């Protein structure tokens, strides 16, 4: 599998080259959010606003009102938690085209509860006018800016940084409100997002080898959330539906799927895998994914629960996540 | 004295020179605004009355002298609420049309403490940008003349009811205007209570750091907030020194003196955001209000006796002015 180093940082420079109304705002996390290459390339379009996110959201609103496209770069927690009122009232209410690029989703950082955005999807999902995108691989990182820019209104992007695997071909960019069909089947429907899709892609072959017919959908648009593929999957899965997300199970993908199922009258069982109404803590990503049940092993367990049988899948039947490349462009401990 | 020097002196504009007609006009607007808000408060048994008392000259001076605005592009009879802004609501609008068209050389007005909305609507009436009967729609269902103004309300451009947010938005607008090369300025009207919000200080730090000298802020320093006198709630003083320490150019003036209010805006821009701290009296022009101190934030008239007293104030205590708009 190809691992792409700093795909966002490089793509942002390329993408913004001829878009002169694109400006970047940063709150002291410029290299941490891979906006440093933009700053070097277009210093006149880069604005440092210091560690002051509430004010930064107001600046973004003002710039957006004047016809600029502010791309706010900071950690997801500092977009969704601290300046929530500013995002709601200065940006979302007025439907301004600010692009909020949030880094360190969920357990991707060892930075602990203060740095891990486990609730960002829920917080942004309840805001009227907000569109929500999440990147699951390098191809999506490289195409998410086009999707965001196509939206008439504010967009929150759950972004990945550093060494990012390429799961989807470069020729298949992210599309707004369109799931990726990663496998067809009618026993169980798996709906995954973000870094959890890679986990699901490693579990699905082992499940199929045991005769389980699995449909696998990858979600990169959390709002709007009305792709007919979701409804089709949850109504055709005979044994039930599993959601797998790097987020608390309240308010994110699991909740969105539950809402669709309930409103459509789909009578299937739903297992929501994710953080079970708990904060996480500072530790490595594989450790946290295992501990909180966000990984391939947890997914196999949920499938067994739905079909009411042990599948006897040995741990070594699930390929391990690839080790980090030797180059390792971004050390995760370097916040 | 040579002829050339005499000519040069004659060309220097002075505050007290020939151009003083606007001062009388600003005072007339301010008195009429007080009277109109008082009438409205008596009629509806309540209102944000002390804000009219404190801010009347500030807003009158902004509109009569300080701001370079084109003619209003808003209808004299305000339109009904068009729905909240969204991608599927092409009908949404802002109340900025009442402050004239957008143009590179024209100023913009950002109204921050939007519970002063009744005062701003009254100013717009007195200067002929809203019809005299527009207040009949104040705080009525489906009207844009909401109790707490929002971006669709006449004279408003941003949704600022969560206090301390407008200054950051105005700074963003000022930054955008500088990027575009506009010469017009961005004027913000704020209340002193907003200097208790941390965001306000974030905004001044950033505006000074980015040298946004197109940003000008008028503060109604009336020393009052919801809970009562500000110094019994939280201290923001010394406000001038604090703002200067943050990098602003600060002028502290008598907030009921139009000439003093306007003077700082006539100086050359010097690389810093400017702030005019307008020291004001929350009971100015309506002495009867002083009995209610320190609870002046929203004046509710509870008894017939109170209603009668304020009605009598209309007859004598308040400064009498013409009822029709000053255009």
Image: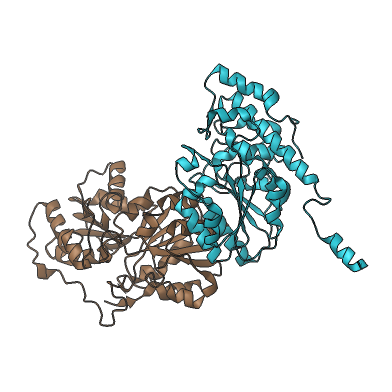
Q: Which chain is brown?
A: A
| Residue that protrudes farthest toward the right in the picture | B3
- Asked if residue B80 shows in the view, the reply is no
Q: Which chain is cyan?
A: B
Image: A217 above or below A234? below
**B175 lies left or right of A306:** right
**B225 lies left or right of B186:** left
| Residue that protrudes farthest toward the bottom in the picture | A326
Q: Nearer the viewer, residue A229 or B228?
A: B228
Q: Nearer the viewer, residue A306 or A329?
A: A329
Residue A169, picture quadrant? bottom left
Image: B120 above or below A65? above
Q: Percent position (x, y) of residue B65? A: 73, 49
Question: How are the residues colored?
Answer: by chain
Image: A34 above or below B323? below
Q: Percent position (x, y) of residue B214? A: 63, 60
Where, quadrant-wise, is the C terminus of chain B in this rendering?
A: top right
**B5 lies left or right of B106:** right
How many marks on residues? 0
User: Residue at 20% of width from left, 55% of height from top?
Assistant: A188
Q: Nearer the viewer, residue A240 or B57?
A: B57
Residue A141, picture quadrant? bottom left
- Asked if residue A20 shows in the view, the reply is yes
Q: Percent position (x, y) of residue A247? A: 27, 56
User: Residue at 40% of width from left, 64% of height from top?
Assistant: A74
Q: Percent position (x, y) of residue A332? A: 28, 72
**A108 lies left or right of A32:** left
| Residue that protrudes farthest toward the front in the picture | B1
Where, quadrant-wise, is the N terminus of chain B in this rendering?
A: bottom right
User: Residue at 29% of width from left, 70% of height from top?
Assistant: A167
């Amino acid at each position: 599998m190809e691992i792409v180093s700093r795909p966002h940082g490089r793509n942002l420079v390329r993408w913004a080259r001829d878009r002169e109304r694109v400006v970047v705002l940063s709150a002291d996390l410029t290299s941490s959010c891979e906006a440093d290459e933009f700053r070097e390339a277009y210093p006149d379009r880069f604005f440092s606003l210091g560690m002051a996110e509430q004010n930064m959201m107001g600046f973004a609103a003002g710039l957006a009102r004047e016809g600029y496209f502010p791309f706010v770069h900071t950690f997801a927690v500092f977009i969704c938690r601290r300046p929530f009122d500013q995002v709601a009232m200065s940006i979302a209410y007025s439907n301004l085209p600010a692009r909020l690029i949030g880094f360190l989703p969920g357990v991707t950082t060892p930075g602990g509860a203060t740095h891990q955005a486990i609730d960002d999807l829920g917080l942004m999902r309840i805001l009227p006018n907000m569109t929500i995108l999440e990147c699951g691989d390098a191809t999506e990182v490289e195409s998410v800016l086009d999707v965001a820019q196509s939206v008439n209104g504010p967009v929150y992007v759950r972004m990945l940084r550093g060494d990012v695997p390429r799961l989807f071909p470069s020729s298949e960019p992210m599309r707004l409100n369109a799931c990726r069909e990663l496998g067809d089947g009618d026993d169980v429907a798996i709906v995954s997002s973000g870094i959890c899709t890679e986990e699901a892609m490693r579990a699905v072959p082992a499940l199929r080898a045991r005769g389980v017919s699995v449909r696998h959908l990858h979600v990169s648009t959390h709002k709007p959330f009305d792709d007919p593929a979701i409804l089709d999957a949850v109504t055709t899965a005979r044994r039930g539906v599993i959601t797998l997300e790097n987020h608390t199970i309240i308010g994110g993908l699991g909740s969105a799927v539950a809402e669709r199922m309930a409103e459509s009258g789909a009578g299937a069982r739903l297992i929501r895998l994710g953080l079970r109404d708990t904060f996480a803590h500072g530790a490595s990503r594989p450790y946290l994914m295992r501990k909180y049940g966000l990984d391939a092993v947890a997914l196999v367990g949920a499938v067994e629960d739905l079909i009411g049988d042990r599948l006897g899948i040995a741990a070594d039947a699930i390929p391990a996540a690839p080790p980090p490349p030797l180059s390792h462009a971004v050390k995760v401990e370097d916040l | 004295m040579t002829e050339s020097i005499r000519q040069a002196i004659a060309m220097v504009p002075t505050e007290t020179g020939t151009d003083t007609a606007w001062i009388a006009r600003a005072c007339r607007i301010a008195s009429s605004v007080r009277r109109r808000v008082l009438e409205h408060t008596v009629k509806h048994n309540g209102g944000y009355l002390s804000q009219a008392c404190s801010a009347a000259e500030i807003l009158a001076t902004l509109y009569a002298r300080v701001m370079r605005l084109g003619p209003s592009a808003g209808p004299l009879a305000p339109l009904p609420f068009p729905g909240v802004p969204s991608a599927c609501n092409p009908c949404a609008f802002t109340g900025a049309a009442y402050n004239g068209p957008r143009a590179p050389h024209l100023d913009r007005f950002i109204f921050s403490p939007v519970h002063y909305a009744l005062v701003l609507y009254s100013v717009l009436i007195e200067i002929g940008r809203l019809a005299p009967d527009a207040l009949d729609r104040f705080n009525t269902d489906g009207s844009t003349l909401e109790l707490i103004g929002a971006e669709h309300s006449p004279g408003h451009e941003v949704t600022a009811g969560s206090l301390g947010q407008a200054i950051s938005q105005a700074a963003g607008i000022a930054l955008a205007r500088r990027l575009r090369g506009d010469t017009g300025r961005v004027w913000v009207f704020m209340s002193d209570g907003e200097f208790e919000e941390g965001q306000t200080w974030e905004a001044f730090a950033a505006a000074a750091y980015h040298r946004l000298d197109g940003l000008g802020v008028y503060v109604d320093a009336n020393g009052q907030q919801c809970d009562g006198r500000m110094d019994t709630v939280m201290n923001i003083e010394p406000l001038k020194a604090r703002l200067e320490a943050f990098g602003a150019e600060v002028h502290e003036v008598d907030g009921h003196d139009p000439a003093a209010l306007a003077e700082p805006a006539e100086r050359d821009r010097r690389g810093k955001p400017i702030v005019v701290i307008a020291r004001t009296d929350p009971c100015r022009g309506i002495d009867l209000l002083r009995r209610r101190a320190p609870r002046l934030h929203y004046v509710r008239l509870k008894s017939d006796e109170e209603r009668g007293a304020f009605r009598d104030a209309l007859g004598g205590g308040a400064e009498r002015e013409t009822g029709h708009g000053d255009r």
